[in-house]
């Protein structure tokens, strides 16, 4: 801006010199001897040095022509023209430029390092697999135990206790994470109407080697959540015993009684003499068998459930035989 001011002043000074040269007829100055009174009067008098033409405030140094429009507050340093809000104000350094959502917000915070990707719902969280029937109520990484079943282990879905018959207790009863084994146990209600109550065991990994058996008992359906691997070479037994139901299932019928559950088998009919009908078989994903002795045999139960096991329910009980 200083360079601009200097140029404007120089131009105006040159204009003053032009007025000085053109203000007098050329013949009048040159006709008199140099240094004579008429010459000094004409040259230094009113026409040359007088304020209206050369040094007067209205032409050269006056505020209205040179110093006014150039250095005045409205043109150069005034807040409305140069250093005011239109330059350094909000449209330049305000939120549209440095605000957190467009620049430093979460979508631009670097690459996601989560194995399954980052959550689009919770900032800073990773995506996780949600097990069916459990959902987010218990995480896959909730248990820390690394478990290897030896001989036979019995998991009680109602208490959380794990026993090795003839040896002792592996995990004591109670909810929460066991400090010794790292196995978490908790109880959940059905996530879907019609499902069974759940007994959930969570651990890091489990192995059932050849010759070993993992057996589950209790009224709640048996759920195992693992953060890493399951290596099953042996047996997993969640079946019923006699008329008693398996985990999350329903009991079989007494003699001359229907079974229980959504796919219960019907009781066998009484026949003549000692020829009574057998109870109908229970059904689940597929139909059970009809009871023995044809016309006296109990009917099989209705099918229910689905391949996805949602909701999670146990099997039904078959019908009891006839009592002749």
Image (spheres, rainbow, N blue to C red):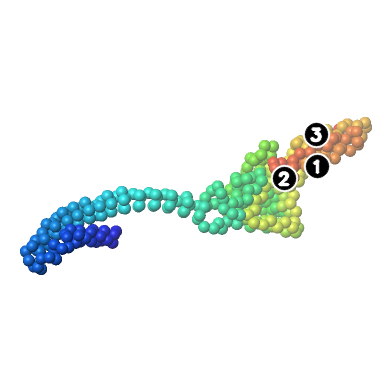
| Residues at circles 3 and 2 in contact by the CB criterion of under 8 Å | no
Question: Of all residues shown, which one is farthest toward the left?
Answer: 37
Judging depth in this view, the residue of 38 and 201 nearest the camera is 38
Q: In this rendering, which labeled residue sits more in front, label 1 or label 3?
A: 1
Farthest residue, direction right: 273
| Front: mark 3 or 2 | 2
- In depth, the one of 242 and 206 nearer the eye is 206
Q: Which mark is residue 258?
A: 3
**For residue 220, side relative to residue 243 (left or right):** left
The dot on residue 303 is none
State which tag comes first along the sequence, 2 or 1. Answer: 1
Which residue is at 29% across, 50% downward?
79
Residue neighbourhood size for the residue with mark 2, other residues' Cα within 10 Å, grouped as few (<14), some (14–19), many (≥20) = few
Pointer 2 and pointer 1: residues touching (CB < 8 Å)?
Answer: no
Q: Nearer the viewer, residue 82 or 95?
A: 82
Mark found first going from the N terminus, 1 or 3: 3
Which residue is located at x 68 percent, y 49 percent? 155
Instruction: Tell whether 212 sits left or right of 277.
Output: left
Please tell me how crowded label 1 is: few (under 14), some (14-19), or many (20+) other residues with Cα within 10 Å: some
User: Is residue 50 toward the left or the right of residue 91 in the image?
Assistant: left
Q: Is residue 1 above or below residue 242?
A: below
Q: Position of residue 89 (x, y in %)?
A: 35, 50
Q: Which residue is mark 1?
A: 286
Spatial CA distance of label 2 from label 1 is 14 Å
Residue at image x 22%, y 53%?
A: 65
Q: Label 2: which residue? A: 308
Name the residue at 39% across, 52% down.
Answer: 92
Between the C-alphas of marks 1 and 3, the distance is 19 Å
> Disc 3 to disc 2, how far (Cα)?
28 Å
2 vs 1, front mark: 2
- Give the class, few, some or many, for how many residues have Cα within 10 Å of label 3's Cα (few <14, many ≥20): many
């Amino acid at each position: 801006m200083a360079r601009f001011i200097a140029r404007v002043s120089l131009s105006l000074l040159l204009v003053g010199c032009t007025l000085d040269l053109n203000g007098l007829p050329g013949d009048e100055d040159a006709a008199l001897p140099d240094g004579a009174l008429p010459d000094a009067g004409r040259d230094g008098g009113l026409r040359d040095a007088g304020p209206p033409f050369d040094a007067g405030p209205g032409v050269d140094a006056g505020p209205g022509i040179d110093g006014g429009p150039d250095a005045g507050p409205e043109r150069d340093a005034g807040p409305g023209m140069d250093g005011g809000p239109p330059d350094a104000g909000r449209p330049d350094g305000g939120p549209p430029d440095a605000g957190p959502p467009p620049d430093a917000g979460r979508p631009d915070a670097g690459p996601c390092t989560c194995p399954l990707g980052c959550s689009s719902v919770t900032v800073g969280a990773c995506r996780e697999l949600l097990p069916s029937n459990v959902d987010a109520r218990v995480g896959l990484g909730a248990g820390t135990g690394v478990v290897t079943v030896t001989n036979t282990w019995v998991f009680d879905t109602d208490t959380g206790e794990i026993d090795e018959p003839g040896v002792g207790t592996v995990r004591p009863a109670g909810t929460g994470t066991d400090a010794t084994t790292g196995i978490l146990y908790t109880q959940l209600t059905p996530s879907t109407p019609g499902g069974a109550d759940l007994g959930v065991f969570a651990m890091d990994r489990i192995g059932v080697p050849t010759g070993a058996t993992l057996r589950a008992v209790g009224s709640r359906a048996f759920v195992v959540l693992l953060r890493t691997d399951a290596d099953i070479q042996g047996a997993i037994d969640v079946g019923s015993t006699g008329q008693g139901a398996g985990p999350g299932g329903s009991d079989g019928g007494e003699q001359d009684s229907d079974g229980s559950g959504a796919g219960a088998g019907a009781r066998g009919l009484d026949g003549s003499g000692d020829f009574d009908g057998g109870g109908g078989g229970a059904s689940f994903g597929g139909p059970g068998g009809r009871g023995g002795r044809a016309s006296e045999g109990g009917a099989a139960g209705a099918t229910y459930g689905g391949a996805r096991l949602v909701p999670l329910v146990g099997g039904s009980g078959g019908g009891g035989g006839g009592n002749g």
